[in-house]
Image (spheres, helix red, strand yellow):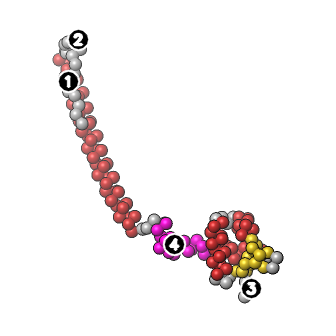
């Protein structure tokens, strides 16, 4: 960055003290500009170093979507949801539909998405923990008594 050093004369004449003040001001501004450019270069170097460190960390830890594809990361969450569903079915003691299960979970201040609950219900059914359809309520779920 270059600053212009020429100062137009006022009225065609410049007094020597005024010219000295102007030259001192310009020299000061140049020093300040150089210092700011130096600071900016240092900040840019720091940003580059931080970006490199962040990229190294991100390479070690996959994104959540990638981790879920790798398997296993979402399991504790699904296990907690399954535990909550089993507890609700045990406490209510009668078959419940999906929406009723969601309502019972909400009553107990347990927030699960409907898609998660449906997924876990299918898993629990496949694992033989619950059964679907009990007499008059074909789209309901109940615990299998063992």
Residue lying farthest to the top in this orientation: 11
**Which of the two discs, 1 and 4, labels the residue nearer the N terminus?**
1
Label annotation for residue 11: 2
**Which of the two discs, 4 and 2, labels the residue nearer the N terminus?**
2
Mark 4 packing: few (<14 Cα in 10 Å), some, or many (20+)?
A: some
Whether residues under marks 4 and 2 lie with C-beta atoms below 8 angstroms apart, the answer is: no
> Residue at 70% of width from left, 75% of height from top?
87
Please give left or right for residue 139 compared with residue 118 in the image.
right
> Residue at 29% of width from left, 52% of height from top?
45
Q: Position of residue 17 (x, y in %)?
A: 20, 18
Whether residues under marks 1 and 3 lie with C-beta atoms below 8 angstroms apart, the answer is: no
> Residue at 73% of width from left, 83% of height from top?
144
Q: Position of residue 13 (x, y in %)?
A: 19, 13
**Which of the two discs, 1 and 2, labels the residue nearer the N terminus?**
1
Let me know if residue 44 appears in the view. yes
Q: Quadrant of the C terminus?
A: bottom right
Of badges 2 and 3, the one in the foreground is 3
Label annotation for residue 145: 3
> Where 103 falls versus 1 (above or below)?
below
* Front one among 29 and 90: 90
3D distance between C-alphas at marks 1 and 4: 67 Å
Label annotation for residue 6: 1
């Amino acid at each position: 960055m270059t600053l212009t050093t020429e100062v137009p004369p006022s009225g065609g004449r410049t007094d020597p003290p005024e010219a000295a003040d102007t030259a001192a001001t310009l020299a000061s501004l140049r020093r300040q500009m150089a210092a700011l450019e130096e600071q900016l270069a240092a900040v840019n170097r720091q940003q580059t170093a931080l970006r490199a460190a962040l990229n190294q960390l991100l390479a070690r830890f996959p994104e959540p979507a990638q981790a879920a594809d790798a398997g296993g990361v979402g399991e504790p969450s699904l296990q907690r949801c399954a535990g909550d569903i089993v507890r609700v079915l045990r406490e209510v003691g009668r078959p419940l539909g999906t929406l009723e299960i969601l309502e019972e979970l909400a009553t107990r201040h347990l927030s699960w998405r409907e898609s998660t609950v449906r997924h876990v219900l299918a898993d629990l059914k496949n694992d033989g923990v619950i059964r679907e359809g009990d007499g008059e309520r074909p789209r309901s779920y109940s615990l299998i008594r063992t």
